[in-house]
Image (spheres, rainbow, N blue to C red):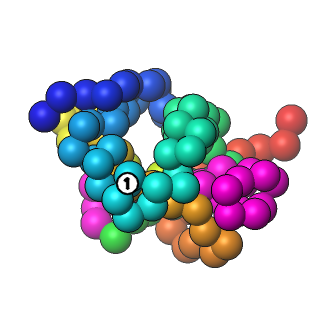
Amino acid sequence: MGSVWEVIAYDGRRVRLTESQKRHISFFHPEALVREERLKETLAKPDLVVRGGQSTTRVLYRHYEATPVTSKHLAVVVRALNGEGFIVTSYFTDKVRRTGVVWKKTDS
């Protein structure tokens, strides 16, 4: 499973996008890859991080005013294994889960 790219996330963990997960996102949520650098930005500088559906997953959100689907939040779902992470999926959404907050950006 080859990596397409890797970035250091907000918590110092290395997170990678694999070829297989990029294909998944391209098929199910192609708008999330229109500006792929936004995935990296969301990982490095999220607005909010919440627990995902499994104990090893987190959902990182960052708001963007201009997207291929109007003003939305980009959600990046990451699974952590062995001290590193990989992207499970990514999509734009209006709804941000507010329960299970792990980390929140502070205004400074």
Question: Where's the C terminus, which quadrant?
Answer: top right
Q: Residue at x 36, y 25 (%)?
A: 5
Q: Is residue 102 above or below residue 105?
A: below
Is disc 1 placed on a helix, strand or loop?
Answer: helix
User: Is residue 59 in the magenta section?
Assistant: yes
Q: Magenta part of the protein: which range? A: 54-74
Question: Where's the N terminus, which quadrant?
Answer: top left
Q: Classify residue 12 as left or right of residue 74.
A: left
Q: Residue furthest left?
A: 1
User: Is residue 2 in the magenta section?
Assistant: no
Q: Classify residue 29 as left or right of residue 20.
A: right
Q: Is residue 100 above or below residue 74?
A: below
Q: Classify residue 7 as left or right of residue 62.
A: left
- Few, some or many C-alpha atoms within 10 Å of disc 1 (few <14, some 14-19, many ≥20)? some
Amino acid tagged 1: Ile
Q: Residue furthest right?
A: 108
> Is residue 75 something that shows in the picture?
no
Q: Is residue 53 above or below residue 26?
A: below
Residue 63 lies in quadrant: bottom right
Percent of width and height locating residue 69: 68, 63
Percent of width and height locating residue 4: 31, 28
Q: Residue at x 25, y 28 (%)?
A: 3
Give the labeled residue for mark 1. 25
